[in-house]
Amino acid sequence: MRIEQRHWRGDIDEPKTARSRRTLALGTLRERYRRWMAGLADGSGEGWVFPQQQDGARPMWDSGVRKALKLAAEEEGCDFAGLGLHTLRRANITWRQEVGGSSIEASQIAGHANTQMTGEYTVVQLRRQEELTQRLQEKLAQAGRRRVKAQE
């Protein structure tokens, strides 16, 4: 999927930064995305992911996209108070790093101008803190065992 324009409250323009213009990998959703795009009014496979129903040439208003997201989340059983596009963006940036991606990779995928912005989006969850703390403690314990062994 290519990000080539931005849409904000009815205003269509260039993306905010040069890094915002990018191609995104969709993984296992690739074929579903292709079917969705092919099924849109113009059938070209190009255009807005969420077009207005009247003509399909213009993007759906922000409120329409939020409503579509809420309906899809309800259908999938994963809706919660506060769910929105920004929530998913923050979660995506956080989870990419949790599964081993670097902050630089997360920053580039998100289209951020710099990794400082990525840091503001990243949420270090308590279970992740626990995992990292336990890994660190195990590393220290191993070093201690090696030291004792070396002294024997």
Image: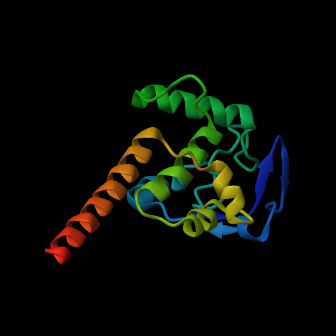
Number of marks drawn:
0
Which quarter of the image is occupied by the C terminus?
bottom left
Task: Please identify the residue farthest to the top as the structure is shown.
Answer: 81
Task: Please identify the residue farthest to the left as the structure is shown.
Answer: 152
Left or right of residue 45: residue 148: left
Residue 67 falls in image quadrant: top right
When the figure is inspected, residue 100 is found, relative to residue 9, above or below; the finding is below
Pick the front one: 42 or 47: 47
At x 44% / y 30%, what residue is drawn?
78
At x 52% / y 56%, what residue is drawn?
38
- Residue 122 x, y percent position in the rendering: 59, 50
- Residue 137 x, y percent position in the rendering: 33, 54
- Residue 102 x, y percent position in the rendering: 51, 67
Pick the front one: 38 or 110: 110
Residue 2 falls in image quadrant: bottom right
- Residue 133 x, y percent position in the rendering: 39, 50
Q: How is the image coloured?
A: rainbow
Residue 53 falls in image quadrant: top right
At x 65% / y 69%, what residue is drawn?
22
Left or right of residue 118: residue 80: left
When the figure is inspected, residue 69 is found, relative to residue 141, above or below; the finding is above
Task: Please identify the residue farthest to the front as the structure is shown.
Answer: 152
Left or right of residue 55: residue 34: left
Which quarter of the image is occupied by the N terminus?
bottom right
